[in-house]
């Protein structure tokens, strides 16, 4: 499917999403977003540090990634960049540079975003200024909000939603 130059964007995106579900251990009937949620809850319930890089991508992020992979495969297969317009296959122009479209949706529902926080303390050696803090590691990410006094584990916070 991915190397079929006649495939539509929807076919490629859908195949890519199914591949990600398989790669992250899901069943054929699972949705990638549901699998992402289950993996998030699994991390949160174990009391481990939440590491977003270990979560499956959102369906829209996987969709755009799949479009870019397809575009690259077709370009390599045909040995020509004139086969497919990259702007129709997961890329955008930033000045004169092609940049990937990572997603066109929010990383998580708004009611969840306000509860995802680090647990750093100002007095701690591992304050938010170090790479030990998820806020610092994910600087600029709209998913993280720094709160200096949060003591509760994420699972407890999420149960209050």
Image: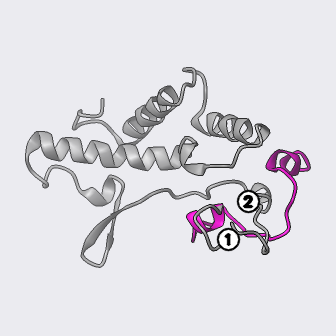
Q: Residue furthest right?
A: 160
Q: Is residue 131 left or right of residue 14?
A: right
Q: Can you give x and y, in whole percent of width and height, for residue 12 in the image?
A: 37, 37
Judge whether residue 102 can be spotted in this image: yes
Which comes sooner in the sequence, label 1 or label 2? Answer: 2
Label 1: which secondary element = loop
Near mark 2 (Cα within 10 A), the count class, few <14, some 14-19 or many ≥20, is some
- Judging by the rendered image, the residue that carries numbered circle 2 is 113
Q: Is residue 22 magenta?
A: no
Instruction: Pick the residue in front: 123 or 119.
Output: 123
Residue 147 against residue 8 in the figure, above or below: below
Q: Is residue 54 left or right of residue 117?
A: left
Q: Can you give x and y, in whole percent of width and height, for residue 108 in the image?
A: 67, 54
- Judging by the rendered image, the residue that carries numbered circle 1 is 128
Q: Which quadrant holds residue 135?
A: bottom right
Give the residue at x 32% y 49%.
Answer: 68
Magenta stretch in the rendered image: 134-161
Quadrant in which the N terminus appears: top left
**Closer mark to the observer between disc 1 and disc 2:** 1
Judge whether residue 138 can be spotted in this image: no
Residue 113 against residue 159 in the figure, above or below: below
Q: Can you give x and y, in whole percent of width and height, for residue 77 in the image?
A: 13, 39
How far, Cα to Cα, is label 1 from label 2?
18 Å
Residue 74 against residue 144 in the figure, above or below: above
Q: Which quadrant holds residue 98?
A: bottom left
Instruction: Pick the residue in front: 47 or 122.
Output: 122
């Amino acid at each position: 499917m991915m190397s079929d130059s006649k495939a539509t964007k929807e076919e490629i995106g859908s195949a890519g999403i199914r591949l990600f579900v398989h790669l992250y251990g899901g069943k054929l009937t699972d949705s990638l977003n549901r699998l992402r949620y289950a993996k998030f809850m699994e991390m949160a319930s174990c009391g481990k540090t939440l590491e977003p890089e270990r979560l499956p991508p959102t369906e829209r992020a996987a969709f755009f990634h799949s479009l870019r992979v397809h575009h690259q495969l077709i370009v390599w297969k045909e040995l020509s960049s004139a086969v497919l317009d990259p702007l129709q296959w997961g890329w955008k122009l930033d000045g004169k540079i092609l940049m990937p479209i990572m997603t066109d949706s929010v990383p998580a529902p708004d009611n969840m975003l306000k509860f995802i926080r680090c647990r750093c303390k100002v007095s701690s050696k591992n304050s938010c200024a170090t790479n030990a803090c998820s806020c610092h590691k994910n600087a600029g990410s709209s998913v993280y909000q720094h709160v200096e006094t949060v003591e509760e584990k994420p699972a407890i916070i999420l149960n209050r939603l």
